Amino acid sequence: MSSLGCSTRLLVTVLLVVVVLFVIGLVGGAIGRGLGLPSISFLDVPMLEIHSFFMGDVLFTAGPLPITNTLLASWITMVFVVLFAFAATRKMRIIPGRLQSIFEVAMETLLNFIESVAGHKNGRRFFPVIATIFIFVIFNAYLALLPIYGPGIFVEESQAAETAVSGTVVEIMEDETVEEGQVIARIDTGTEIVDVVAPMSGHVHFHEVQEGDEVREIAAGDSVAADDEIASIVSKPPLIRSASTDINMTLALAVMAVFFIEFWGLTGKGFRTYISEYINVGELFRAGRLLVRGKITDALMATITGVINAVIGGLEAISHMTRMISFAFRLFGNMTAGEILLLSATFLVPWMMAIPFYGLELLIGFIQALIFGGLTLVFASIAVAHEGAEEH
């Protein structure tokens, strides 16, 4: 017997394995610990906390340029896309192979979609930019699902800085991000002031001290022993983080999209026609000429119309600029929310809970790429449309 394209025995076996893994994850994960069930060490998931929400974390600097984990992820995406395109097109054949077929079908579908909205001439003109946006966004989203990509939330690691001396804490820093070797506390031994330094870079909590197996709160004025440990939790950022969870990247992509929209509109309609949509003061100049000729009533009506046109032009300019904010925050918000959802599911029930959400993230990645590229296409088509076509 067979079911769903496989044998019934295999299907039952797979379902049984899934159920067993789900039960183990449920019992041994955060939900099980919350219910007071015995802890399973290899299922322990570190506590999560948000520190750098909008931007990536700086890994190192190259001169004046800070290299963040999100910037590194965007470089990986570009390299991957270039290698994929090279592999698909390096041996072009009239009868395409499997990889070439996938590449041609994807490009032809995208081109047909663009031409269906913008027409043949403008579709060919818009295609390089729209396709670049779509491919970059979707590959960013899909690569971020790989295990090598870390969360945009720091993972706490149990680390500590040994005091090495006994004495009284005279100064202790508040919670903040520090570099390895930076002074985090000072202890007065009675004869000298001894510095305690951070054992590693990251976000450190300095409000507790560990004495053997016990942890207690600590502040300036408290006494510590030579074997105590200060700053028991150090949070480290991931090496690679999804580029779409950095507002700088999504904003840069939005600026590029709006720049090309305005560029196409400017070259398509001509400078004078296109700029008149934003700076429409022709009626005000006409009102001035009527006033010079002594036509007071006509000048007054023309002035009112001119003011209305100028205000509408200003609002139009503002609406075009707000597109950048809309583009940037829509992509950033959806991709960051998806990342937090995956982390929360994995934290609650390790292994199995995140699998359905991975499928959802595949769909969301495609939708976000389609929305970003599609809106750029629609706005570009409106920008190059002739006035008569727009009125029609």
Image (cartoon, grey):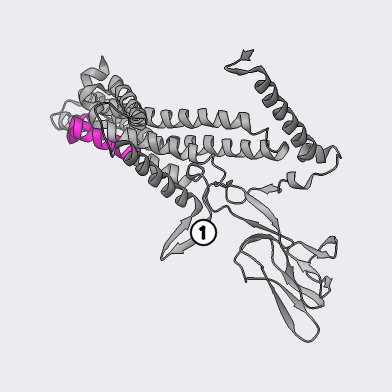
Residue 100, quarter of the rendered image: top left
The x, y position of residue 160, in whole percent, is 73, 65
Report whether 255 appears left or right of 196: left
Please say whether residue 168 is one of the residues in the magenta stretch.
no
Magenta portion: prevailing SS class = helix
Q: Secondary structure at mark 1?
A: strand
Q: Badge 1: how crowded within 10 Å, few (<14), some, or many (20+)? A: some
The relative height of residue 380 versus residue 388 in the rendered view (above or below) is below
Quarter of the rendering occupied by the C terminus: top left
Does residue 276 appear anywhere in the picture? no
The relative height of residue 332 versus residue 103 in the rendered view (above or below) is below
- The residue indicated by pointer 1 is 59
Q: Amino acid at mark 1?
A: Leu
Residue nearest the viewer, comparing 32 with 93: 93
Report whether 99 appears left or right of 191: left
The x, y position of residue 159, in whole percent, is 71, 62
**Residue name at image x 28 percent, y 39 percent:** 90
Q: From which residue to which does the magenta span run?
A: 257-284
Residue nearest the viewer, comparing 193 with 317: 193
